[in-house]
Amino acid sequence: MLTWLDRNDLSFPPIERALREPNGLLAAGGDLSPQRLVQAYRQGIFPWFEEGQPILWWSPDPRTVLRPAQLHISRSLAKVLRQQRFEVSFDRDFPAVIRACAAPRSYANGTWITPKMQQAYIQLHEQGIAHCVEVWEGGQLVGGLYGLAMGKIFFGESMFSRADNASKVGFVTLVRHLERSGFVLIDCQMPTQHLHSLGAQAISRREFAACLHTYADQPSDVRWTPHGGVPGIGAEPPH
């Protein structure tokens, strides 16, 4: 049975109660306050819903994740990285990245990144919890992604690309940066061919929850530099 959340109560039901069909649907209702979102991610839960629907909360089984050391870079992508076509930065323009992720896609109707969702994650960014990667070409924002960093786990939310390989370059740059900073896991939530081509794999919800328990509160030395270029990928971002 689906649990309806009280706006005044931040607690969630145990993730083991999530439905099998649709896979992972756990609860509905509540709100998108920063406190509730942080509580959700710490338990392996994330919001995903469309405009006009109540807020829906999910914890799928299995869970798609990427361990930084298992990042796979194809020969063609390695060639793109060597060409240094793109410039990459972190946290330079979070609102622009989330707006781009919310823009219409040719293969989908509508978006789940509603205006309320955008504002909620912008608040998390202002609190130093949500972060983004920007990919630039010729001074234009052509790709990027955003998510949450807690302890030694990064929770990926969405990515976009306006140029071939732009989002892949941004993702590879992020993974390398997180690996150097001691992160052990990147949550990709749901499986896609794009993510699997980069080394993502499925683990059980129970294993994912155990990783959260172990690593979500461990300190890391990650640094997010809004105005610095990323070594080995590109020069300084455009000013």
Image (cartoon, rainbow, N blue to C red):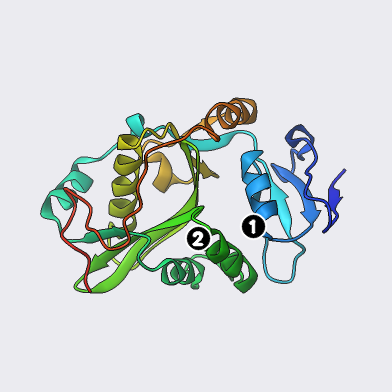
- Residue 66's image quarter? top left
Q: Is residue 111 something one can see in this rendering?
A: no
Query: Between residues 99 and 161, which one lies in front from this camera angle?
Result: 99
Q: Residues within 10 Å of mark 2 (few under 14, many from 20)?
A: many
Identified at 17% across, 57% down, the residue is 234
Foreground residue among 185 and 26: 185
Q: Position of residue 4 (x, y in %)?
A: 85, 52
- Lateral position of residue 80 relative to residue 122, left or right: left
What kind of element bears circle 1? helix
> Is any atom of residue 32 visible in this view?
yes
Question: Eyeballing the image, is 72 above or below 226?
Answer: above
Which residue sits at x=51%, y=52%? 129
* Residue 209 against residue 123 in the figure, above or below: above
- N-term mark: 2 or 1: 1
Q: Secondary structure at mark 2?
A: helix
Asked if 235 appears above or below 96 in the picture, the reply is above
* Horizontal arrangement in the rendering, residue 178 relative to residue 113 (left or right): left
To which residue does mark 2 refer? Answer: 125
Quadrant occupied by the C terminus: bottom left
Q: Amino acid at mark 2?
A: His
Tell me: 77 left or right of 107. left
Residue 100 position, x and y percent, is: 44, 70
What residue is at 35 percent from the left and 65 percent from the top? 92
Number of numbered discs on residues: 2
What's the distance in space between the residues labelled 2 and 1, CA to CA?
10 Å
Q: Which mark is residue 148?
A: none
Tag 1 residue: 34
Residue at 19% x, 41% y is 75
